[in-house]
Amino acid sequence: MGGFFGIVSKDDCINDLFYGTDYHSHLGTKRGGLATKNSKGFSRSIHNIENNYFRSKFESDLPELHGNKGIGVISDCDAQPLIFGSHLGRFGIVTVGKINNIEELAKKAFQKKIHFSETSGGDLSPTEIVATLILEGDSFEQGIQNAQEAIKGSCSMLLLTEKGIYAARDKLGRTPVIIGKKDGAYAASSETCAFPNLGFEIYKYLGPGEIVFMTADGCEQRKRPGEKMQICAFLWVYYGYPASNYEGINVEFVRYRCGSALGKKDDVEIDCVAGIPDSGTGHAIGYANEKNIPYIRPFVKYTPTWPRSFMPQDQSIRDLVARMKLIPIRELIEGKKILFCDDSIVRGTQLQDNIQVLFDYGASEVHMRPACPTLIYPCDFLNFSTSRSTLDLAGRKAIKELEGVDEKDLDEYAMASSEKNAAMVERIRQRLRLTTLKYQNLENLVEAIGLPKDRLCTHCWDGSSYF
């Protein structure tokens, strides 16, 4: 996915920029980057963070990056920020999102005799494509709107200019952008968890397609938000950090409500409730509180030597490393009927291994309650599971086993009350060797978030979306 942070200050901003960007480390796994503007011009630093932490990669660069405005990003895709000289002036840019029509946009640019730099992997840089679209405008505001209209998918962005920073949320608001304020400074962030310890208070949640321009003296709206919004509901379920708010709604609070909803109509007899670390924890606490059943930690997570468990290119190695991070505690497992909450079941490969470990350590029963419905449709709008084929999704794999193809009657399989949905869930339960498996239904998830269904993107569960 990815996340960004930008700041304009009356004083040197590099420490706030560094730590504000670092607070987005849970959103990206490949590259980090910082860019600043001072009286001598623009400075930039980009590092590969696949096998290390953002902080350790950038600490030595900070003396060279001083300035009173800057942007930073942690990305799952291309190297950013990029710096451009243009008829609009010199500027830096970072982006978050997914451009589905990137080849089409590149072809149109080639017809205009525009060329692009080649990335290390030989792919087009989405951020460079966005910058090219912006430069077709007569102003930054016009250029950003041009880019948003041309892009199919989603793209939020920050532009670092000579005079300040533009912050723009993608057209349908699938990714959040929040403005923070403190004395002498304004900041834009993908995550509100970056604000409290840096002294910022939430000033404004940008609406879908909204554009603002920040200086150290203020934040000025340059384009009003659109009416339609499709913010990714998975932010509250999994992506988002527990301390963050989107649309004024806290992530951890939603996870408690999700867990509570899972527990209200559940009549299974169990000894204890647990969460798959880390994102399943909040859901499990909500379930345990609702049912008044003890919450335990039969798995503890060991992270010091495994900063990027999912980075090896070989999937089997990724699964091995991820499994090695979860250490079982026999005394909390042996002889117990344990119910686990998790954010979701995507592929199920790692979960299957974890469940087997529980039985190997003496669990008498293992029940699973995912906090969202079965994932059936691959994400078209964010860089979630982009390396996985449709058949990698546990739901689609079960559908193919039942139907012989993986694209038949998807609407019926997505309906929580249907016979086909029950058959799909049972097939997943059998593969994972669970005692019972019950998914959250979509209505309860939407209610837990607290926004109207038509303001949320729920495409990965029911296939619905605006394009």
Image (cartoon, rainbow, N blue to C red):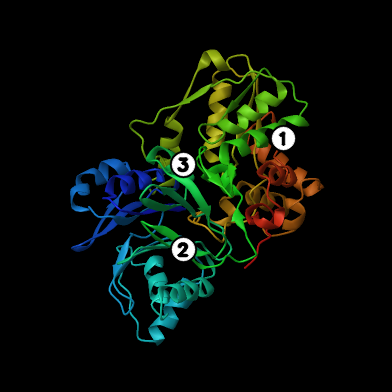
Q: Are marks 2 and 1 in contact (CB under 8 Å)?
A: no
> Closer to the observer: label 3 or label 2?
2
- List the residue tagged with mark 3: 193
Q: Which amino acid lies under the numbered mark 3 shown in the image of this protein?
A: Cys
Q: How far apart, in angstroms, are the residues tagged by discs 3 and 1? A: 26 Å
Give 206 or 310, whichever is nearer the viewer. Answer: 206
- List the residue tagged with mark 1: 261
- The location of residue 212, given as percent across then percent down, is 47, 63
Q: Secondary structure at mark 3?
A: helix
Q: Quadrant of the C terminus?
A: bottom right
Q: Secondary structure at mark 2?
A: strand
Give 349 or 242, whichever is nearer the viewer. Answer: 242
Q: Residue at x 50, y 41 (%)?
A: 241
- The location of residue 279, given as percent across then percent down, is 53, 36
Question: In this rendering, does residue 346 appear at all?
Answer: no
Number of residues whose C-alpha sits closer than 10 Å to that of mark 1, classed few (under 14), some (14–19) or many (20 or more): many
Looking at the rendered structure, which numbered label has been put on residue 220?
Answer: 2
> Closer to the observer: label 2 or label 1?
2
- The location of residue 27, given as percent across then percent down, is 45, 47
Looking at the rendered structure, which numbered label has been put on residue 395?
Answer: none
Q: How far apart, in angstroms, are the residues tagged by discs 2 and 1? A: 41 Å
Q: Is residue 66 above or below residue 156?
A: above
Quadrant of the image occupied by residue 449: top right
Mark 3 or 2 closer to N-term?
3
Q: Residue at x 65, y 32 (%)?
A: 368
> Closer to the observer: label 3 or label 1?
3
Q: Secondary structure at mark 1?
A: helix
